[in-house]
Amino acid sequence: MADRVFAGAILVIALLYTYIAFTVIEAPFQYDPLGPESWPRILGIFAMACALYLVIRPDVAQLGTSTKTLGRLAVVVVLLFAYGYLFERLGFILSTWLFCATLAWMLGAAPLRAVLFGAAAGIVGFFVCTTLLELNLPVGLTAFLT
Amino acid sequence: MDAVFSGLSAGFAVALDPFNLFLVLIGCFAGTLIGALPGIGPINGVAILLPIAYSLGFPPESALILLAGIYYGAEYGGRISSILLNVPGDASAVMTTLDGNPMAKRGEAGRALSLSAVASFVGGTFSVILVTLFGPMLAAYAVTFSPSDYVALMVFAFATLASLVGSNAVKTLLAALLGLMLASIGIDANTGVARYTFGIPDILAGIDFLVVVIGLFGMAELIHLVEQQVTGKLKPLALDKSFVSMKDLALTRWTILRSAVIGFFIGILPGTGASVASAVAYGTEKRLAKDSDNFGKGDIRGLAAPESANNAAAGGAMVPMLTLGIPGSGTTAILLGALLLFNVTPGPLMFEQRPEIAWGLIASMYIGNVALLVINLPLVGLFARLLTVPQQYLTPMIAVLAFIGVYSVVSNPHDLYMITLLGVVGWVLRKLDFSLAPVILGFVLGSLFENNLRRALSISGGDWSILLDSGNAIVLYVLAAVVVVVPIWLGRRKKKVAEA
C-alpha cells in the first residue's frame, strides 16, 4: 500500500512534468531538431510508464515503521529545519550547540553530557573550520568573537 | 606501452608531491575512520565530505586524490564494523559479515581483520594495475565514439543498472529517471529556455549537485540511523592477538586473485559497484569450493573473496569514469560530479588534456593501497575503538558536517532546508526498496545523455536512424538487451527447475 501511494504521487508528478513538456516548454527559435522539449517528453513518458507499473504491481506492503518511531523521526526533521532556520540568525556556534545538545539528549545522552557535547561541537567546530580550514561559516550573534 | 609508462611516471610525480601525498594519507585515514563507523558506508562518507573538500580551494587533482582516498579507505574500514559488530556499513560489506563475524566470535578477530586487510590490498592493487593497462586503451578507443555511440552507451549503462542493481528493475529504472528529470531542471544550455524553474531564480542554473548529494546520502542516512537506533548498546567483539598466517594466505591466494578479477570487471560495468561484485565473488567461491559447508560459519575463503572483490570493484569503477565520463558506481558518480564542479569534464580526452588528473589519480591509488595496508595492520585496534562511539553523538555530527559543507559552498540558507527535504525523500525511497545510487547516476548523466542525443539528431537533421548507424552502437544495444534478458531467463529457468 505504501508503495502504491508513493508510486501514485510519482505518477502525478510525472504527469505534470510531461504536461509541461508538451505545452509550456518551447524554444522561440528552433536551433536543433529536438529542441529543449523533446528530452523531457521522453523522460516523462518513461517515468509515467514505470510509476503506473508500480501502482498496478506494488511490492512493499508497509513501511514497517512503528508510529512511535515515525514520531521520533518527525521530531528529528523538525530539529533539522530549526537548525537550518537558526544557522545564520544565531550563528554557527550557538545554533550547533543547541542542535547537538537537543538531538544527543533526545537520542539518549545524559542532559549534562549532551550540553557539553553541543558546546564542544559548536566551539571546536567553528574554530577548526574558520581558522584552520578557512571555510565560511555564519557568526550571527557571536560576531564579537571574530 | 611507452605512453602508459610515461603517463604513469608523470602521475607519480603528481601523487608524490608532498602536499598530494599528505592528502592521500589523510584521505585514507579519514576514510578508514568513516568506514569503521557502524552504519556509514563509502558513499555517505564521500558525499558528506565532498563539499568541504571542494571549498578548501585545492586544485582539482588534489581534491580528487583526497576524495578517492576517502572512498578507498572507507571500503577498507567497512570490514571492521562488519567483522567485529556484524553491522555492515553498506551493501558491499554485507558479504563480509557472513564469514568475518563468525570468525571473530570464535576468537579469531585479529586473524579475520588482518586476512581481510591483505585480501583488500591484493584486490585493490591488482585492479589498479588493470586500470593502468586498460584505462588508456579504452580512452584511445573511446575518442572515436560519435554522439550516437554515446547514446547507445547510456542506454547500455541504464540497462545494466536496472538489471543488476536493486531488487526491482522497474524501481531502479524509475529512480534513475527521477535523477534524469531532476537534472533537466534549469536553463537549457542550447536554447536558453528555462525548464521547470517556475520563476524561482535560485534554480535557474539547475539544482545544485552538492545539495542533491548531501540530501540523499548525508541527511537520508542520518534519518535512517535515528530510525535504526537500537535501545541497547551495540557491543563489539573483543580484538585478540591472533594474526593471519602464511598458511592462510597460501590457502586463499587463488580465491583472492579470482575475486579481484571478478570485482574489477563487475566494477567496470556502469552503475554496478562493489555490492554486486562482492556478492558474485562470494557466490563463485562457494560454488567452486569442494567443502562449501563451512561457508557462512567462518571460512577464511568466504571472508577473503568479498573483501578482495569490493576493493577491486572500487578500482574498476574508476575506468569508465576516467575514460568515458560514465561512472561505474554510485560513489564514482559523486567523484564525477566533483570533477564537473571543478569544470573538468571526464571523458576520453582527459588522458591527453588533463593527464595530471587522470594519471595523478591512478598513481595515488597505488600509494593509497600501500598506505591503507600499513595503516590498517597496526592501527586496527584504534579503529576498532571507534565502534564504541555512541550513536547519540555520531548522528548529530553528520548533520553538522552536512550543514558546514553546504553552507560553505553555496552560502544560501534555503539550501539548508532543501537538503533536509531531500533527506526525507531519500529516506522514503530507501524504505520502499528503491536504491539511491541510480538517482545520482541519472542526475550526473542527465545533460550528457541529452546533449549527445540532440547532437546526434542535429548531425542527421532529425533522422532517428542515425542512432543505429554505427557498429559500436549496435554492439552496445545488443549487450544492453543481453544484460536485461539473461537474468530474466535465468530466473525463469531456476523457477522451472525448482518446480520440476
Image (tube, coloured by chain):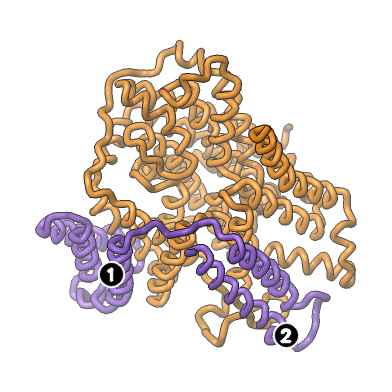
Chain colours: A purple, B orange
Residue at (36, 40) in percent of width and height: B87
In front: B287, or B339?
B287
**Residues tagged by mark 2 and mark 1 found on one chain of the structure:** yes
Looking at the picture, does residue A63 appear above or below residue A82? above
Question: Which amino acid lies under the numbered mark 1 shown in the image of this protein?
Answer: Leu
Q: Is residue B52 visible?
A: no
Few, some or many C-alpha atoms within 10 Å of disc 2 (few <14, some 14-19, many ≥20)? some
Question: In this rendering, would B344 be left or right of B62?
Answer: right
- In three-dimensional space, the C-alpha distance between marks 2 and 1, rounded to whole angstroms, equals 42 Å
| Residue that carries the numbered disc 1 in the rendered image | A79
Q: Which chain carries label 1?
A: A
Q: Mark 2 lies on which chain?
A: A
Considering only order in the chain, which callout, 1 or 2, is on the residue closer to the N terminus? Answer: 2
| Residue that carries the numbered disc 2 in the rendered image | A26
Query: In the rendered image, which quarter contains the N terminus of chain B?
Result: top right
- Percent across and percent down for residue B246 are 44, 12
Q: Can residue B492 be seen in this view?
A: yes
Question: In this rendering, would A141 be left or right of B294?
Answer: left
Residue at (49, 40) in percent of width and height: B92
- Percent across and percent down for residue B440 are 55, 59
In front: B2, or B65?
B65
In front: B57, or B330?
B330
Looking at the picture, does residue B68 appear above or below residue A62? above
Query: In the rendered image, which quarter contains the C terminus of chain B?
Result: top right
Q: How many labels does the image show?
A: 2
Question: In this rendering, would B300 be left or right of B489?
Answer: left
Q: Quadrant of residue A89?
A: bottom left
Which tag is nearer the camera, tag 2 or tag 1?
1
